[in-house]
Image (tube, rainbow, N blue to C red):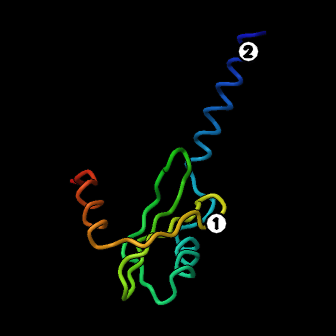
Amino acid sequence: MKKILIALLVAFTVAGVYAADKPKISMKKAKAIALKKVPGGKIATAELENEGGKLIYSFDIKTTKGITEVNVDAMNGKVVAVQEESPAKEAAEKKAEPKKH
């Protein structure tokens, strides 16, 4: 009986992990949400990221004042972070990113 309970627990845990890998909010909807936070901005980059086990859309939005990063929860559409980025910080982040082939 104990083995069956452990097997079920593992199965539900694995199923939960895979279910969390798919966003409930579309990229298009998340973009609209992010742009409301930065009126007049234009999206420079957009990506779906796993931050600490949580799926978020990360948008770099370009304005006349610089770049604003807006993070939107991919499961419920809530804005989880808004951060102004200086050109120096943006360059440092770009340099730290792994090279894509």
| Nearer to us in this view, 47 or 89 | 89
Three-letter amino acid code of the residue under disc 1: Lys
Q: Quadrant of residue 37?
A: bottom right
Q: Secondary structure at mark 1?
A: loop
Q: How far is disc 2 from disc 1 in space, using C-alphas? A: 38 Å
Q: Is residue 8 placed above or below 76 in the rendered structure?
A: above
State if disc 1 and disc 2 touch (CB < 8 Å).
no
Residue name at image x 71 percent, y 11 percent: 3
Q: Earlier in the sequence, mark 2 or mark 1?
A: 2
- Answer left or right for 1 relative to 56: right
Q: Residue 6 placed where, x, y %?
A: 69, 17
Residue in the foreground of this view, choosing between 21 and 57: 57
Q: Secondary structure at mark 2?
A: helix
Q: Quadrant of the N terminus?
A: top right
Q: Position of residue 89 (x, y in %)?
A: 31, 65
Label of residue 52 in the image: none
* Front residue of 95 and 2: 95
- The image quarter containing residue 2 is top right
* Residue 28 in picture, x, y percent from top left: 54, 73
Q: Which residue is mark 1?
A: 78
Residue extending farthest to the right is 1
Residue drawn at 36 percent across, 89 percent down: 64
Q: Amino acid at mark 2?
A: Ile
Q: On screen, 31 above or below 73?
A: below
Other-residue count near label 2 (Cα within 10 Å), few / some / many at <14 / 14–19 / ≥20 = few
Residue marked by disc 2: 4
Image height check: is 67 above or below 48?
Answer: below
